[in-house]
Image (tube, grey):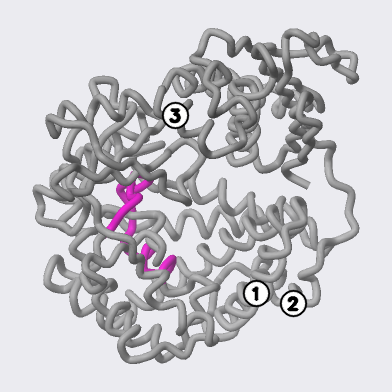
Amino acid sequence: MQQLLDLYREWSGAEPVRTERLPGAGSNRVYYRMTGADGSVVIGCIGTSTDENHAFIAIARHFVEKGLPVPRVLAVSGDEKCYLQEDLGNTSLFDAVRKGRESGGRYSADEEVLLHKTIILLPKLQFVGGQGLDYSVCYPQPSFDVTNVMFDLNYFKYCFLKATGIDFQELHLEEDFRRLAADLTSEPSDTFMYRDFQARNVMLRNGQSPCFIDFQGGRRGPFYYDLASFLWQASARYDESLRKRLTDAYYTEALHYAPMPPREHFDQRLQLFVLFRLLQVLGAYGFRGYFERKQHFINSITPALDSLHSLIHKCHFPYTTLVDVISRLTPSRQQPPAVPTPGKLVVRIYSFSYKKGIPHDDSGNGGGYVFDCRGTNNPGRYEQYKQLTGLDEPVKKFLEDDGEILTFLNNIYPLADAHVSRYIERGFTSLMFSFGCTGGQHRSVYSAQHLAEHLHERFPQIEVHLCHREQGINRVFGI
C-alpha cells in the first residue's frame, strides 16, 4: 500500500485525502479509489503479477492512442507492481441492466439502448484495437490456438461430462474435439479477442457511455468469440429476438472496419463459437457445482443446458459423438452426482503467539512454513488497537496504511502459490502455514487471514482450514 501512496504523491504532488478499497478485485489485484484535495479521483491498482500488470498497462496505452473508450493509465511504478488509472465511475453495464436480467430477460427499451451502445463499440475495440498491437505483451499468451481450445474442451469432459455418469466413446469424443478445435482456429485473424467480454467489464461513464475494463487477458483471436461470450451468457437471459437485433447491429458496425464474410457464413461460424462457449461454461459450472458443491453454479447448469439443446436442434454440427452426448444431457442431472471425488489438498493456516509456542502439526508432517511477523510495525503498541484484532477494520487500515505487512505478504504469496501448485501436482493432501507475532492478535491474524483468502481464491479446488489460535476462531474455505 505504501508504494501506491508514494506513486500517487509523485504523480499529484500531494497525499490523497481519502483512499477507499474497492470490492470485487481478483485475488492478486487490489483496487483503491483515491481522492485528492481538489476532489479529483483516480483508481490505484496493486497487482502481484507484474506480467499481468504489464499486459494491462501496455494494451490500455495502445487502446488510448487508438481512441478507444478505456481508462487512461496515469502513472506506473518502476517495477510495475502498482499503477494509477482513470476512474470511470461506479456504474457497470451489469448493474444498469439488472432489472431486465432479474425479470427473466424482459429488458426495457432503455436497457436495450445500453446493450446496443455496447455491442456496436465491440468491433472498434477488436479491429482498431488490434491494429499495430504488440501481441507479445498479452498475458498469459499472445494468441488463441488449438491448445486453448483443447484445454477448455477437456475441462468440459473431466469436470462436467464425466461427473454426470453418461456413457460415451471417449476416443470418438476426442476426435470430435480435435475437429472442433481445427474448425474454430481455421480462419486467420488479426483482431483483438477480449476473451472476457461481459457486462461486468463494461463501465458506463456518466451512466450512459460504455467503457471497457479488465482486458488484460485478451489476445489475438477470432472476433466471433467475444460476440458469442456476450450474447449467450446464460445469466443474461437474452431472448432470440434481442440476440438477433444485437448481432445485426454488431455485423453492420463491423463492416465499417473490415470486409466481413457473407452473412450466412458469419452466422454459421458464430454458432460454432456459441457451441464452444457453452461447453466452456458447463466445464466451469461442473467444477464449481459438482465438485465444490456451490449451489449457484449448480443452478446455472439448467439454463446453460437449455441453450445447448436449443443450439444443437437449430444447427447442424458435424460432431456426431459430441452432439449425441449433448442430446442425452438433461437438466435433471443438475444435482451433484454421487461419484467419488479425488482427495483434496488441505492447507492449514494458523495465527499464533510466540509466547505460547508454535502450533503443533497433527498431520505428522512437521509443521510446514512458519513466518515471523514481528519485524513489521505492531498496532498493539497503541492504546486504541489493544482490544482489537487483525480482523477489525481499524487494525487493517493501520497495517495497510503503514504498508510493511503488505510487503511482507507479497513476498510470501509467490512462495505459497508455488508450493501449493506442486503439492496439487504430486497428489499430496496436507500442507501447513503458520504466522506468529508477539501476542497472536494483530499482525499474525491479519497475515493468516489474507493468505487463507488468497489461496482460496487462487486454488478453489483445495480446502483451506484457518485457525486464529489465540482468538479461538476457526473457519474452513472450499467445502
Cβ atoms at labels 2 and 3 below 8 Å apart: no
Residue closest to the eye, 360 or 345: 360
Q: Is residue 215 magenta?
A: yes
Indicate the position of residue 354 as horizontal and vertical percent values: 72, 9
Q: Marks 2 and 3, Cα distance to the nearest angstrom?
A: 47 Å
The three-letter amino acid code for the residue at tag 3 is Glu
Mark 3 packing: few (<14 Cα in 10 Å), some, or many (20+)? Answer: some
Dot placed on the residue nearer the N-terminal end, 1 or 3 = 1
Cβ atoms at labels 2 and 1 below 8 Å apart: yes
- Closer mark to the observer between disc 2 and disc 3: 3
Which residue is the site of mark 3?
400
Res 331 label: 2
Indicate the position of residue 390 as horizontal and vertical percent values: 60, 30
The three-letter amino acid code for the residue at tag 1 is Leu
Q: From the viewer's perspective, is 204 left or right of 307?
A: left
Q: In the figure, residue 191 lies in which quadrant?
A: bottom left
Cβ atoms at labels 1 and 3 below 8 Å apart: no
Secondary structure of the residue carrying numbered label 3: helix
The three-letter amino acid code for the residue at tag 2 is Pro
Q: Marks 1 and 3, Cα distance to the nearest angstrom?
A: 45 Å
Secondary structure of the residue carrying numbered label 1: helix
Q: From the viewer's perspective, is 119 left or right of 377?
A: left
Q: Marks 2 and 1, Cα distance to the nearest angstrom?
A: 7 Å
Res 266 label: none
Which residue is the site of mark 1?
305
Q: From the viewer's perspective, is 417 left or right of 172?
A: left
Decide: is 136 above or below 66. above
Which region of the structure is painted magenta? 212-230
Q: Residue at x 62, y 56 (%)?
A: 284
Secondary structure of the residue carrying numbered label 2: helix
Q: Residue at x 84, y 36 (%)?
A: 343
